[in-house]
Image (cartoon, rainbow, N blue to C red):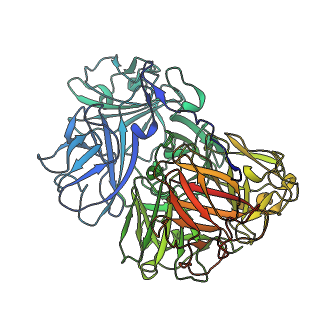
């Protein structure tokens, strides 16, 4: 049997932070942005956050309606609600209404009573913060009217604190490490800039065990009851440092790049030097690159969600836009997941659907990139949408349906039709695409498996950071605003690793040509690493001023395999280390012409004929040949003239997902 070349992925580092040497805790276990639609009845929000035994806080806001922000925590109890946009005392809901319970995997809702958190048909955002040392803590206390300290369990110095009197109407008082000094504070329910009052924080900086309050009634009136939400800053973990930070509190001035050491998923921003609203931006509602259309909710107002300039994320932080001349503070929380996946169903899902409008394709993960193809053929089929380039937040959000077409050189296109709506657990089909018979390949970004980076070319040799955490083995790039071919590089056909001639290093996704694209010295200028990929001067990869997107794949044990094989002219098994076979197979011949063929389990990877589509063409799927078969360890390739995916001595690359 001809040799089959596969490479085991390097072991991705188990990012996270530990509690005194205990088990590693990951950001996905302590924070969640979860979107839902109200039903005016009961529903359970399953976001993976253990509130019932660990404790924490849920902050929710209607996106579609002008209603109050509502904050509830496990210390005060699920019936006690506070409004970030109001000075009012906490409201007490009746049992069975509003937030009915804190659960081990999220929280439950009942019909509206005091607050509109579950109105039928309204859309909502919820942000859940779990109590965790060096991340977040909730503290309640009773005021005594005298300068004092309050103990906490944050396990590090609080870098931002939101303090609210709960028994009567007072403002929300905010401490932030980046304000002018510890004499200063901000007001969460106001647009006002920073103010100074020694009686608020007693002119004392918090420590890792206590924070100080003075005699100001907003924070310490005698007999008054208070809640304080405490946020850490770059605390790292016990024994883990640097890249293991999951929350940062800092400042920036104007339009700039803020370096965090990670890509954020949630950012709270306030201009502390002037009168501007607070802003919350998150990647579930839309934190895209470029940041011209961020979905914005403002803690100081009950207004419905708006769209505007804000930030766009990069692998190591975020870049601000629309903040010229402003001095701002922020809280940023790291994007997850941080845990390396162990099963393919947690990061990849194929679907075949001709469902009606509103049909939901349910996954076990938030979709970060959706690749789809019309099975009957179409002039613009085989297209890609991404959360990072612009997430469709409603089925009628036409501005968000920004496509790249794999069979064409075209720049990304914004459709004028109702396309897809993206949620925490899949996507919903809009009215336009409900008329097509379509196959969907839905991907979630995860360490060791798949990552995506948006960047702007410089025309000069450079490195760009990514968060795959292992060296990518397959990279696919496309310019977004210019007419250029799709570019493909793989470590299994790389001049830099000494396995191919210099003029046969890259390929074009929208072409059937062999691997003989641009020389590697001008495209991929050095082998990628676990943290960066390197680009040369070639315009299709790195043209000056060109916006582009890069998709990065790697072999993740039991989940995915990037590899190569040599054909034997009959049939052979491609072992991928799987236990239940491949659900997705992409194959491309490298030494001669051949389509970028895709097979998947929803249309059939079976012993008989297997439908396949080609990413480089607009042709309808072919259903009349048996080119691949199932095998528990991966898949089987058969030599048929229809596809020529096992020609004797021919060379191939593949991507398989379990």
Q: Is residue 277 visible?
A: no
**In screen coordinates, is 224 left or right of 552?**
left
405 relative to 301 in the view: left or right: right
Q: Residue 603's spot in the image, x, y percent?
A: 47, 70
Q: Nearer the viewer, residue 429 or 587?
A: 587
Residue 55: quarter of image:
top left
Question: Who is closer to the viewer here, 131 or 653?
Answer: 653
Report the number of numbered marks: 0
- Residue 456's place in the image compared with 640, above or below, is above
- Measured from the top left, where is residue 312 in percent x and y? 59, 53
Front residue (pair 615, 478): 615
Q: Position of residue 475 (x, y in %)?
A: 69, 54
- Front one among 404 and 328: 404
Relative to residue 396, is residue 581 depicted above or below? Answer: above
Q: Single out the residue that lies furthest toward the left.
A: 95
Q: Can residue 626 be seen in the rendering of this structure? A: yes
Position of residue 220 measured from the top left corner of the image (x, y, whole percent)? 29, 25
Q: Residue at x 57, y 75 (%)?
A: 625
């Amino acid at each position: 049997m001809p040799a089959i070349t596969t490479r085991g992925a390097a072991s991705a580092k188990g990012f996270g932070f530990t509690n005194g040497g205990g088990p590693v805790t990951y950001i996905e276990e302590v924070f969640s942005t979860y979107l839902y639609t109200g039903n005016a009845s009961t529903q359970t929000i399953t976001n993976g956050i253990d509130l019932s035994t660990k404790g924490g806080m849920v902050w929710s806001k209607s996106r579609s309606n002008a209603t109050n922000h509502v904050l509830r925590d496990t210390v005060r109890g699920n019936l006690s609600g506070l409004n970030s946009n109001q000075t009012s005392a906490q409201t007490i809901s009746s049992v069975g209404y509003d937030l009915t319970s804190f659960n081990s995997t999220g929280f439950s809702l009942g019909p509206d009573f005091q607050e509109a958190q579950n109105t039928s048909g309204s859309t909502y955002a919820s942000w859940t913060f779990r109590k965790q040392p060096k991340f977040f803590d909730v503290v309640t206390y009773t005021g005594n009217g005298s300068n004092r300290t309050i103990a906490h369990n944050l396990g590090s110095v609080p870098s931002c604190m939101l303090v609210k009197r709960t028994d009567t109407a007072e403002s929300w008082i905010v401490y932030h490490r980046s304000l002018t000094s510890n004499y200063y504070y901000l007001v969460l329910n106001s647009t006002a800039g920073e103010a100074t009052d020694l009686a608020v924080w007693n002119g004392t900086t918090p420590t890792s065990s206590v924070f100080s309050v003075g005699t100001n009634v907003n924070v310490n009136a005698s007999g008054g009851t208070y809640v304080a939400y405490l946020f850490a800053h770059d605390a790292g973990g016990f024994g883990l440092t640097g890249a293991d930070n999951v929350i940062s509190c800092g400042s920036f001035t104007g339009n700039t790049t803020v370096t965090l050491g990670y890509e954020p998923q949630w950012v709270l921003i306030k201009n502390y030097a002037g009168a501007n609203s607070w802003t919350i931006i998150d990647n579930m509602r839309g934190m895209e690159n470029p940041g011209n259309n961020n979905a914005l909710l403002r803690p100081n107002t009950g207004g419905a969600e708006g769209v505007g300039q804000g930030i766009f994320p990069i692998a190591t932080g975020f870049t601000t836009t629309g903040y010229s001349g402003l001095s701002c503070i922020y809280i940023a929380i790291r994007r997850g997941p941080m845990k390396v996946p162990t099963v393919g169903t947690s990061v990849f899902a194929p679907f075949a659907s001709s469902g009606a409008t509103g049909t939901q394709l349910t996954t076990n993960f938030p979709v970060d990139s959706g690749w789809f193809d019309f099975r009957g053929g179409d002039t613009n089929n085989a297209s890609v949408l991404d959360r990072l380039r612009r997430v469709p937040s409603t089925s009628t959000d036409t501005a968000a349906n920004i496509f790249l077409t794999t069979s064409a050189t075209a720049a990304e296109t914004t459709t004028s039709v109702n396309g897809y709506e993206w949620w925490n657990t899949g996507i919903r089909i809009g009215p336009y695409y409900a008329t097509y018979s379509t196959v969907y390949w839905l991907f979630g970004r995860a360490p060791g498996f798949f990552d995506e980076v948006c960047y702007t070319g410089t025309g000069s040799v450079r490195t760009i950071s990514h968060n795959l955490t292992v060296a990518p083995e397959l990279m696919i790039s496309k310019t977004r605003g210019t007419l250029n071919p799709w570019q493909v590089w793989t470590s299994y056909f790389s001049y830099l690793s000494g396995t191919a001639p210099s003029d046969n290093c890259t390929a074009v996704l929208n072409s059937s040509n062999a691997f003989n694209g641009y020389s590697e010295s001008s495209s991929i200028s050095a082998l990628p690493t676990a943290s960066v990929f390197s680009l040369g001067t070639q315009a299709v990869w790195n043209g000056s001023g060109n916006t582009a997107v890069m998709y990065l794949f790697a072999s993740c044990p039991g989940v995915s395999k990037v590899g190569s094989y040599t054909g034997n002219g009959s049939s052979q098994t491609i072992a991928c280390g799987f236990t239940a076979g491949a659900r997705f197979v992409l194959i491309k011949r490298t030494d001669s012409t051949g389509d970028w063929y895709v097979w998947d389990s929803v249309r059939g990877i079976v012993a008989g004929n297997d439908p396949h589509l080609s990413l480089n063409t607009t042709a309808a799927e072919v259903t009349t040949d048996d080119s691949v078969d199932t095998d528990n360890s991966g898949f089987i390739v058969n030599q048929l003239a229809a596809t020529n995916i096992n020609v004797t001595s021919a060379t191939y690359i593949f991507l398989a997902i379990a």
